[in-house]
Image (cartoon, helix red, strand yellow):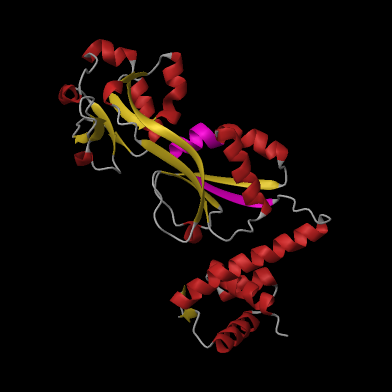
Amino acid sequence: MDNRAGEMDVFVQVAELRSFSAAGRKLRLSPSAVSKLITRLEDRLGTRLLVRTTRSLQLTPEGEVYLERAQAILADIQDAERMVAAGGAAVPRGQLRVSASVAVGVRCIVPIVPDFLALYPEIELDISLSDSVIDIVGERADVAIRVGSLRDSSLKARKLLESRRVIVASPAYIARKGRPATPDDLDHHNCLTFNFRPTSEGWAFRDPRTGSVFVKPVFGNLQANNGPTVRSLCLEGMGLARVGRFHVQPDIEDGTLIPVLEDFNPEDIELIHAVYAGHDHLAARIRAFIDFLASRIA
């Protein structure tokens, strides 16, 4: 039988490193041997996986599909070998890449890192925080923590938390500008907004008399691309902010931020999910992290 796992490994290294020479050095093969293995693989599959020029190496659409499946298969093989080496028990180990929004990362992930790594010392944690939605497969993330509704995709997800949104202001801001009594009062207030959500959409409110929900356009002189920055500006008395309550709950409890317009709160929910690629048989390190985060974030 052909050594298909070996061919997959060679192809994955070439695709990830974008170089026959670099893949050869890593695998201790000559560039010509690497080239022959890739050609044999393409001949067997009957399709081109790589487009090679003198200056670049690119994956074809078929190559992208094969790369994703080959990475998953090789990961399964590694997990199987680890299970056998550990006496049948999958020991969480290896590098774990986690992507999250800045707010969730600061509020929920960073505080649990010491306990998580103390429990799983063989895991190497790589955390990236950004409010941009990344391509999990393209960015090679194992887990992404996403806030809001999920797009339809082949990715799997586990719900971690539901948190309603709340409008808050600091006591200093309220003392200086007054406390809004109705959404219309926001015309006279500085509203801190996110620059990745068009301000023309405004903030959602519920009419307490009819129960209907409406959107009120809001305006201000400050925007930011992440929750911690908006929270900090709000704490500094720069204006009102509408954020997920999970993010500012400690500030509300200690009185440094005060909820406003609660009679008009539409109780809209902000969902937080752990999203991952793959199938039901997760690598031990991924499952351990998701289970640990779910138990702590609750």
Q: Which residue is drawn at 56% across and 60% down?
A: 278
Magenta stretch holds residue 36: no
- Magenta stretch in the rendered image: 94-109
Q: Residue at x 63, y 56 (%)?
A: 282
Q: In this view, does 214 lie to the left or right of 277?
A: left
> Dividing the picture into quarters, in which one does residue 216 lie?
top left
Say if 254 sits above or below 193 in the image.
Answer: above
Residue 40 horizontal/vertical position (percent): 61, 87
**Residue that extends furthest to the right in the rendered view of this protein:** 87
**Residue that extends furthest to the front in the rendered view of this protein:** 210
Quarter of the image that includes the N terminus: bottom right
Please give the count of numbered marks on the rendered protein: 0
Q: Residue at x 24, y 43 (%)?
A: 198
Q: In this view, does 137 lie to the left or right of 268?
A: right
Say if 185 sits above or below 223 in the image.
Answer: above
Residue 271 horizontal/vertical position (percent): 43, 41
Q: Nearer the viewer, residue 8 or 15?
A: 8
> Dividing the picture into quarters, in which one does residue 243 lie?
top left
Say if 96 sits above or below 242 in the image.
Answer: below
Quarter of the image that includes the C terminus: top right
Residue 60 shows in this picture:
no
Q: Which of 167 and 256 is in front in this view?
A: 167
> Dividing the picture into quarters, in which one does residue 118 lie?
top right
Q: In this view, does 16 lie to the left or right of 258?
A: right
Residue 47 horizontal/vertical position (percent): 50, 85
Residue 90 horizontal/vertical position (percent): 74, 53
Residue 140 shows in this picture:
yes
Magenta stretch holds residue 102: yes
Q: In this view, does 16 lie to the left or right of 92?
A: left
Say if 186 sits above or below 89 in the image.
Answer: above
